[in-house]
């Protein structure tokens, strides 16, 4: 059982909870191998509300629900729902909670996840609230790092290239800052450095933070976590255009560095395709863990694992 009803921030994912979740994720991965689908949530309905574009998150939640034999209801963009008519998020949630047993939502507004979680009588999962948080992605990322490195502490991690606006970077750094001895190096355009408040939050938890425009992955880093510049979140289009292809990992940057390369995807300009075949490029494997991770979260929040 998880000590919370809803998951809105990776701050909730403490090392103790992560340990429990990893055991359930391993069980879910084994059940996919052995049986494909299991009847764990066949008496439940999952609501999937995606008001911002999504491929991996939406499909892996669908696949997770299917593999647990849950029913599903969907709303896939704001224009096809009553938002278009001016309905409030609170009213929408009050309605959806009566159609489902758990609500998964992605929404463009930072803080929308807290509003929805506080309104909903049924468990709620944040699948991305604007540029704020993406806790289920952080769980996938942490699971991948743990599989590959055998630990989540004492790691040297590079984050790039839009630490200001990437909710994936925000959530993973908040999760990993709860472990001992982690050192974070944020890199990318100066204008896209992490906010002072995020750095303070991470340092208060004990993580050592450095911000620099230049990093050499051959300098002993364990993990590089890169994410595209978040084009849709730029108020200043010229700033995006100026930087869009400047920060890009090449084969020479990555090969023989011993540094794992993770990316929540979609990959746009941040990694050259020539990197894909290197043994330390693990982003597609990382994406594959989306299904067992989301199966574990659905099952645990519904009190079935
Ligand atoms: C991320 C997101 O939506 O924040 N994608 C994902 O869920 N895998 C990263 C991104 O869109 O850049």
Image (cartoon, rainbow, N blue to C red):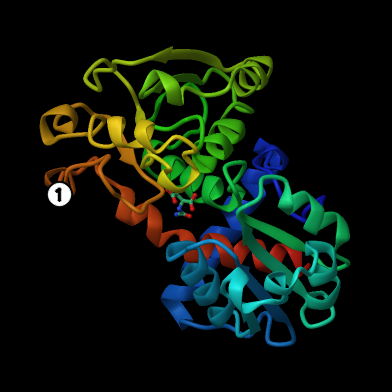
Residue at the image point whose x is 72% and y is 69% from the top = 103
Q: Does 50 appear above or below 72?
A: above
Question: What SS does tag 1 mark?
Answer: loop
Q: Does 65 appear above or below 186?
A: below
Q: Position of residue 216 (x, y in %)?
A: 24, 18
Residue at the image point whose x is 43% and y is 66% from the top = 55
Q: Does 61 appear above or below 178?
A: below
Q: Position of residue 64 (x, y in %)?
A: 54, 73
Q: Does 215 appear above or below 60?
A: above
Q: Is residue 5 visible?
A: no
The image quadrant where one finds the N terminus is bottom right
Residue at the image point whose x is 54% and y is 67% from the top = 28
Number of marks drawn: 1
Q: Is residue 109 left or right of residue 155?
A: right
Q: Quadrant of residue 25?
A: bottom right
Q: Quadrant of residue 131?
A: top right
The image quadrant where one finds the C terminus is bottom right
Q: Is residue 120 visible?
A: yes
- Residue that carries the numbered disc 1 in the rendered image: 277
Residue at the image point whose x is 52% and y is 50% from the top = 137
Instruction: Classify mark 1: residues with Cα within 10 Å, few (<14), some (14-19) or many (20+).
Output: few
Q: Is residue 198 left or right of residue 26?
A: right
Q: Quadrant of residue 263?
A: top left
Q: Position of residue 294 (x, y in %)?
A: 57, 63
Q: Position of residue 39 (x, y in %)?
A: 63, 85
């Amino acid at each position: 059982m998880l000590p919370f009803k809803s998951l809105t921030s990776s701050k909730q994912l403490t090392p103790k909870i992560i340990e429990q979740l990893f055991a359930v994720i391993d069980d879910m991965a084994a059940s996919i191998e052995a049986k494909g689908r299991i009847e764990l949530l066949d008496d439940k309905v999952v609501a999937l509300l995606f008001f911002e574009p999504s491929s991996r998150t939406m499909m892996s939640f669908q696949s997770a629900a299917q593999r647990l034999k849950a029913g599903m209801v969907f709303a896939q963009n704001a224009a096809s729902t009553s938002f278009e008519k001016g309905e409030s998020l609170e009213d929408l949630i009050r309605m959806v909670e009566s159609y489902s047993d758990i609500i998964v939502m992605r929404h463009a507004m930072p803080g929308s996840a807290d509003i929805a979680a506080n309104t909903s009588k049924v468990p709620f999962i944040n699948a991305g609230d604007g540029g704020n948080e993406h806790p289920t992605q952080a769980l996938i990322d942490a699971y991948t790092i743990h599989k590959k490195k055998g630990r989540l502490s004492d790691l040297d991690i590079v984050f790039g290239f839009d630490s200001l606006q990437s909710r994936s970077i925000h959530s993973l750094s908040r999760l990993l800052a709860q472990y001992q001895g982690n050192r974070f190096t944020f890199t990318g355009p100066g204008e896209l450095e992490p906010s002072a408040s995020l750095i303070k939050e991470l340092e208060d938890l004990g993580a050592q933070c450095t911000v620099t425009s230049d990093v050499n992955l051959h300098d002993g880093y364990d993990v590089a976590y890169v994410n595209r510049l978040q084009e849709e979140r730029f108020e200043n289009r010229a700033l995006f255009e100026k930087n869009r292809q400047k920060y890009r990992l090449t084969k020479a940057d990555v090969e023989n560095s011993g540094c794992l390369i993770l990316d929540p995807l979609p990959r746009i300009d941040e990694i050259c395709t020539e990197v894909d075949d290197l043994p330390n490029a693990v982003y597609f494997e990382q994406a594959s863990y989306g299904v067992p991770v989301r199966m574990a979260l659905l099952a645990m929040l519904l009190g079935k694992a």
